[in-house]
Image: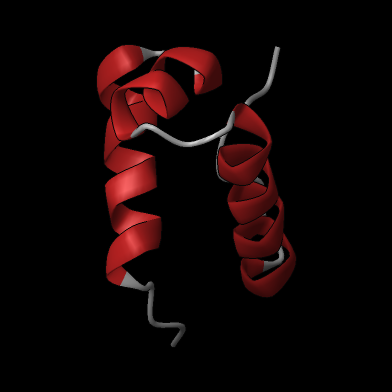
C-alpha cells in the first residue's frame, strides 16, 4: 500500500473542490505546474490515473 503525503492529500482535495488545476493552484498559492507535477508523480507511483486532465 502506498502512503500519500499530507501535501498530496491537500492538493487532491483542492483539485476536487475547485474542479481545475489552475483554480486549485491559485487557492493553494502555488504554481499550476507544481500541482500538475505532484499529480504526475502520484500517477507514476500508483500506476493509475488520479485525475482526468481534459
- For the rendered model, the colour scheme is secondary structure
Above/below status of 37 relative to 4:
above
Left or right placement of residue 30 versus residue 36 in this view: left
> Residue 25 or 39: which is nearer the viewer?
25
* Residue 20, position as x, y percentages in the image: 48, 14
Which quadrant: the N terminus? Answer: bottom left
Q: Quadrant of residue 41?
A: bottom right
Left or right placement of residue 37 versus residue 26 in this view: right
> Residue 48 or 22: which is nearer the viewer?
22
Which quadrant: the C terminus? Answer: top right
Left or right placement of residue 13 versus residue 26 in this view: left
* Residue 29, position as x, y percentages in the image: 37, 32
* Residue 8, position as x, y percentages in the image: 40, 59
**Residue beneath the point at 69% across and 49% down:** 37
Q: Quadrant of residue 11?
A: top left
Left or right placement of residue 26 versus residue 51 in this view: left
**Residue beneath the point at 38% across and 82% down:** 3
Above/below status of 8 relative to 33:
below
**Residue beneath the point at 31% across and 15% down:** 18
> Residue 47 or 7: which is nearer the viewer?
7
Amino acid at each position: 500500500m502506498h502512503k500519500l503525503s499530507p501535501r498530496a492529500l491537500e492538493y487532491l482535495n483542492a483539485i476536487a473542490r475547485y474542479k481545475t488545476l489552475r483554480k486549485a493552484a491559485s487557492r493553494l498559492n502555488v504554481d499550476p505546474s507544481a500541482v500538475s507535477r505532484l499529480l504526475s508523480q502520484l500517477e507514476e507511483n500508483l500506476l493509475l490515473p488520479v485525475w482526468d486532465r481534459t
